[in-house]
Amino acid sequence: MTTPILLAALGGLFTELAGVLNIALEGLMLIGAFTAVLITELTGSTILGSIGAALAGTALAYILGLLTLRFKANIFIAGLAANLFAIGVTNYLSSIIFGTKGVIRFIEFPELIKLVGHNFLFYTGLVFTLFTIWLINRTAFGLRLRASGYNFTVLKIKGVDPYDVQMKSILISGALSGLGGAALSLKLGAYVPNMTAGRGWIALVTIYLGRKHPAGIFITCLIFAGAEYFSNAAQGIFQIPADLLLGFPYIITFIGMIVFSVISNRNKGVE
């Protein structure tokens, strides 16, 4: 499950560089996951479902941006509200459209288009990783993005509205997180209300473990995916409680965060 976390983490990277703490990644992923299966079921196209997921994530992100940047709502509370809103609205819509608030599974659901053994969303994640590296480091927008997170005054002197830059970063975050949700639900061919549980927080953690660099985030996501694969495979091999094995990826991520913190503090001490 590298792709969902990678896409959400890349989205969170934009807001992180812009100086915006986006804890709504989980809600953005959830609403994207629901929209993806809904549109795919209606149109028979996983590509249209993915586009719809990105647009749904962008719409929720726009509301989040308005609340925090224009109306000055607390970013942490607004992020929690966005997560709760995503849970509520998807459950409500699923009850109206499908008559259930639980798992939504379809008998004949279109499969994701595959290339060389991987679905197209996996390659989308790779493309966005490379694109993010270029955008952040080689464009004027990337320079303004980083400046908005470090020094508002410089942007204002240059005649650039830092709030506009931050809003764009939130919208990008919403689109990529929505795609991350689509990568989850379309691969399963179903929607599960708690399918994004914890993944938004893991995406946030990978940003720091990856040292706020797209390549580092990609490597961190691979490590988490490897740990998750091991935990799934080990359930039928080792006599270890299932709950402990299921928590193994999160334990590895937590340990990695501690190691990263220790190394960072030592480097600061050397400097």
Image (spheres, helix red, strand yellow):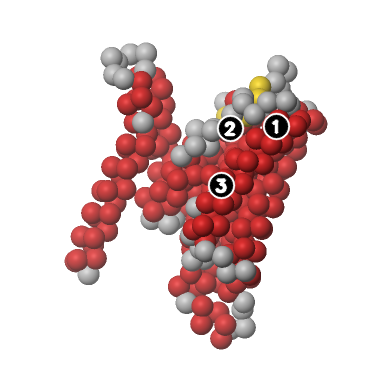
Q: Amino acid at mark 1?
A: Ser
Circle 2 crowding by C-alpha within 10 Å: few under 14, some 14–19, many from 20: many
Res. 170 in view: yes
Q: Earlier in the sequence, mark 1 or mark 3?
A: 3
Residue 113 horizontal side relative to residue 206, left or right: right
Which residue is found at the position 80% from the left and 31% from the top?
43
Which residue is found at the position 69% from the left and 52% from the top?
59
41 over 67 or under it: above or below: above
Q: In terms of secondary structure, where does tag 2 sit? A: loop
Q: Amino acid at mark 2?
A: Pro
Residue 263 horizontal side relative to residue 58, left or right: left
Q: Earlier in the sequence, mark 3 or mark 2?
A: 3
Residue 141's image quarter?
Answer: bottom right
Which residue is found at the position 65% from the left and 35% from the top?
91
Read off the residue under disc 1: 94
Read off the residue under disc 2: 193
Instruction: Give the image location of residue 37, x and y in percent.
Output: 69, 32
Cα gap from disc 1 to disc 2, whole angstroms: 10 Å
Read off the residue under disc 3: 83
Residue 239 horizontal side relative to residue 38, left or right: left
Circle 3 crowding by C-alpha within 10 Å: few under 14, some 14–19, many from 20: many
Cα gap from disc 1 to disc 3, whole angstroms: 17 Å
Res. 124 in view: no
